Amino acid sequence: MITAKSTSTIVSEPIPAGTYLARCYSMVHLGTHDDEYQGRAKKTNKVRITWELPTELKVFNPEKGEQPMVVSKEFTLSMSEKANLRAFLTSWRGKPFTAEEAASFDITKLLGVPCQLSIIHEPSKKDPSRMYERISSISSVMKGVTCPAQINPTFMFSLEAFDPNAFAALPDWLKDIVRNSDEYKALSAPAEQPQVAQSDSPTSIVDDGIDLPF
């Protein structure tokens, strides 16, 4: 469980701009980090959500064959009225959250859920000559359209219930971010080696997106 409260595959080139069928398959709790807003220091608890684009296949590794392109977006783990996460989820499901729903919402309900993502390109702040993709908007799948079955296995890592197997499966750069979080530092020498090998078999989730479970 990763609870928001009221108060991957790496590609060498950006995904072409456009609107795509997508399915949420990965959620990584990055934890609380020192941040700054309008010149003031603050603590920010973040999560990284990743979607696969099952209609956009590409060979990244010849041994694995075609795999879907993926795209991620980071959010502050908050469901307050002005939070970006709340606005994003409202657009996804097509209706606003009640105060009761937003008070404590388990965002892992999103895993396996299809949607439509609009992707745009923006220049990198560090290198304006380099373009990268960004999710500009999300919506539910149009009526009558079926999103293909999930290809990548579902993945979830939460610092609220630390799983050494899930942590070990993270890429090194994400492990470094998690290690710098307040939650990780508070853990008592967490094990980092997997006890059980993670299955490579994909899940088989088919949902046309008409009735979203959130």
Image (spheres, helix red, strand yellow):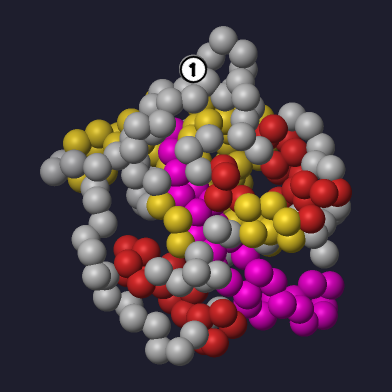
9 on left or right of 146: left
Could you say where residue 126 lies in the image, as x and y percent from the top left?
57, 64
Q: Is residue 45 magenta?
A: yes
Q: Quadrant of the C terminus?
A: top right
Write down the quadrant of residue 56 in the picture. top left
| Badge 1 amino acid | Thr
Report if residue 86 is visible in the image: yes
Could you say where residue 139 lies in the image, as x and y percent from the top left?
66, 30
Q: Is residue 17 magenta?
A: no
Please, which residue is most extreme toward the left here?
Answer: 63
Identified at 39% across, 83% down, the residue is 190
Q: Quadrant of the N terminus?
A: bottom right
153 on left or right of 71: left
Which residue position holds label 1? 146
Residue stretch rendered in magenta on the structure: 25-54
Could you say where residue 136 lies in the image, as x and y percent from the top left?
66, 39
